[in-house]
């Protein structure tokens, strides 16, 4: 079973009633890839800036995440800032900085195009559509 994950890799600044954390590694692509790595060797597609921690890229590789589809561009990584109250199901976006995501159009490596499963994580629906046009008859497509 081959799994391609297309999603954001980001820095998050999060405020809760219990504290504030600034510029921690986040993004749906990050979390999904690491979680899936316990069951398969996922392939990730996304873009980060040169400020993205090398230690996280090393962690991906150590967990068996294929990073061929990950672009590293000059500039800053996507940044999201939000506030969560006592109910973690309710959040407020304070700020979004697209940075290297601005104008990004994912291009799947040839080895990713025949994936059995494609997970389209939390990214722009136009980008999700671009990915669907590039894959060849996956057995399952899931979207966040």
Image: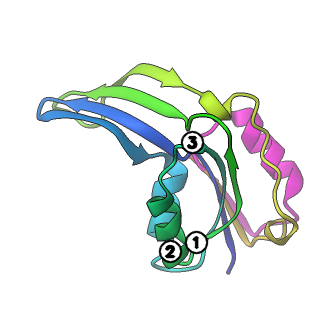
Residue 135 drawn in magenta: yes
Q: Which dot, 1 or 2, sits closer to the camera? A: 1
Q: Which mark is residue 86?
A: none
- At label 2, counting other C-alpha atoms closer than 10 Å, the crowd grade (few under 14, some 14-19, many 20 or more) is many
What kind of element bears circle 2?
Answer: loop
Instruction: From the image, tell me which residue sits under label 2.
Output: 37
What kind of element bears circle 1?
Answer: loop
**Disc on the earlier residue, 1 or 3:** 1
Provide the residue span drawn in magenta.
121-141
Query: What residue sits 46% from the left and 69% below the top?
Result: 59
The quarter of the picture where residue 16 lies is top left
Instruction: From the image, tell me which residue sits under label 1.
Output: 65
Q: Is residue 61 above or below residue 128?
A: below
Q: Which dot, 2 or 3, sits closer to the camera? A: 2
Work out how far the residue at label 1 is from the one at label 2, CA to CA, in angstroms. 6 Å
- Percent coordinates x, y for residue 60 in the rendering: 52, 68
Q: Is residue 34 left or right of residue 50?
A: left
């Amino acid at each position: 079973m081959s799994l391609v994950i297309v999603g954001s890799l980001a820095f998050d600044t999060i405020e809760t009633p219990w504290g504030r954390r600034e510029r921690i590694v986040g993004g749906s692509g990050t979390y999904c890839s690491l979680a899936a790595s316990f069951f398969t060797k996922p392939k990730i597609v996304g873009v980060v800036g040169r400020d993205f921690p090398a230690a996280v890229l090393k962690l991906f590789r150590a967990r068996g995440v294929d990073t061929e589809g990950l672009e590293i561009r000059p500039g800053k990584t996507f940044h999201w800032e939000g506030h969560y109250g006592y109910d973690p199901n309710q959040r407020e976006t304070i700020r979004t900085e697209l940075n290297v995501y601005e104008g990004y159009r994912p291009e799947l490596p040839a080895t990713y195009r025949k994936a059995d499963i494609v997970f389209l994580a939390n990214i722009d629906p136009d980008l999700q559509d671009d990915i669907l046009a590039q894959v060849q008859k996956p057995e399952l497509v899931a979207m966040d």
